[in-house]
Image (tube, grey):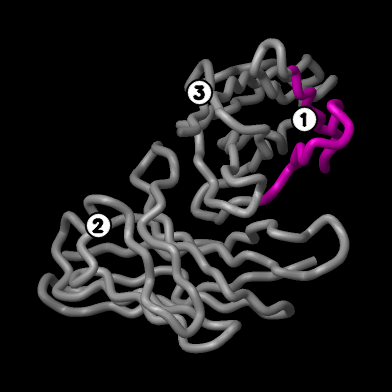
């Protein structure tokens, strides 16, 4: 099946530093990737939709200058948390949409394993 | 606008008992509906999905769900719970005929007692 990886799986950083999280679709091409944030014991909150070769679409209330998203290829999207602060500590999950033209996986989102960010 | 309501943030069952996790949706267009499972510190794994074909959908790990339009429900069931089923379960609805974004419910934590 379709596999999505995230790197790193966890990261601890100091307040004020920037952190980059990578999301890769390993065995399929994904023109669209999604970035979610999940607070402890809560649901996933969509942060932004990342389209290959174009600017990401951010959800209301998400600071685009703080959460920089780059989708440079059909298999890679990155989320950079700039000038991270303790309130940015969270579990970040990406997903990739499989645009395969056959089978039941069409338009299905496949999720990465998540990245635990802790800002000290 | 679409939304999902999961009744019960925490459900506890005994091993071998029936699992029933409730999900109701709101959608102005025919929905695509999904159930995902999340184990601690992991991403989401698709259990099953409804995409306007059969109303009774069978998924992995013995789970199934039935789409009931009249009740706007998509409850998840499993006849006999295993300890390994303990996890967080999310119901989600997709807009724009399945080509849009996923809108998640708040999740239900399933505990399985020995």
Q: Which residue is mark 1?
A: B82
Which region is colored magenta? B45-68
Tag on residue A88? none
As helix, strand or loop, the secondary structure at mark 3 comes to strand
Is B50 one of the magenta-colored residues? yes
Q: Is residue A58 above or below residue A25?
A: above
The numbered mark 3 sits on a residue in which chain? B
The residue wearing badge 2 is A62
Using residue B17 as the reference point, say whether residue A96 is left or right of it.
Answer: left
User: Residue drawn 50% across and 41% down?
Assistant: B103
Q: Are marks 2 and 1 on the same chain?
A: no
Residues behind callouts 3 and 2 on a single chain: no
Q: Which residue appears at 56% of the width and 28% of the height?
A: B27
**What residue is rendered at 28% in x and 78% in y?**
A19
Q: Residue furthest top?
A: B71
Q: Nearer the viewer, mark 3 or mark 1?
A: 3
**How many C-alpha atoms fall within 10 Å of the one at disc 1: few (<14), some, or many (≥20)?**
many
- Compared across the picture, whether A15 is left or right of B101 comes to left
Tag 1, which chain? B
* Callout 3 crowding tier (Cα within 10 Å): few <14, some 14–19, many ≥20: some
Q: Residues within 10 Å of mark 2 (few under 14, many from 20)?
A: few
Q: Is residue B16 left or right of residue B34?
A: right
Q: Residue furthest front?
A: B29
User: Residue A53: x and y, percent?
Assistant: 47, 85
Give SS at disc 1: loop
- Mark 3 vs mark 1: same chain? yes
């Amino acid at each position: 099946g379709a596999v999505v990886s995230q790197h790193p799986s966890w990261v601890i950083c100091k307040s004020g530093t920037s952190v980059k999280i990578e999301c890769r679709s390993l065995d399929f091409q994904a023109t669209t990737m999604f970035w979610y944030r999940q607070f402890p014991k809560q649901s996933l909150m969509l942060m932004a939709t990342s389209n290959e070769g174009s600017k990401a679409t951010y959800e209301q209330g998400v600071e685009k200058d703080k959460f920089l998203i780059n989708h440079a290829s059909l298999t890679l999207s990155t989320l950079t948390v700039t000038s991270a602060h303790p309130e940015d500590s969270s579990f970040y999950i990406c997903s990739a949409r499989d645009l395969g033209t056959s089978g039941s996986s069409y338009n299905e989102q496949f999720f990465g394993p998540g990245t635990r960010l802790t800002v000290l | 606008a679409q939304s999902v309501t999961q009744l019960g943030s925490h459900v506890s069952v005994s091993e071998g008992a029936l699992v029933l996790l409730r999900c109701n949706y709101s959608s102005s267009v025919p929905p695509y509906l999904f159930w995902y499972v999340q184990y601690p510190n992991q991403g989401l794994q698709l259990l099953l999905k409804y995409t306007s074909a059969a109303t009774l959908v069978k998924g992995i790990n013995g789970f199934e769900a039935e789409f009931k339009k009249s009740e706007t429900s998509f409850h998840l069931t499993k006849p006999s719970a295993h300890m390994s089923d303990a996890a967080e379960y999310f119901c989600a609805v997709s807009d724009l005929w399945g080509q849009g974004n996923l809108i998640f419910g708040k999740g239900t934590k399933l505990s399985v007692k020995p």
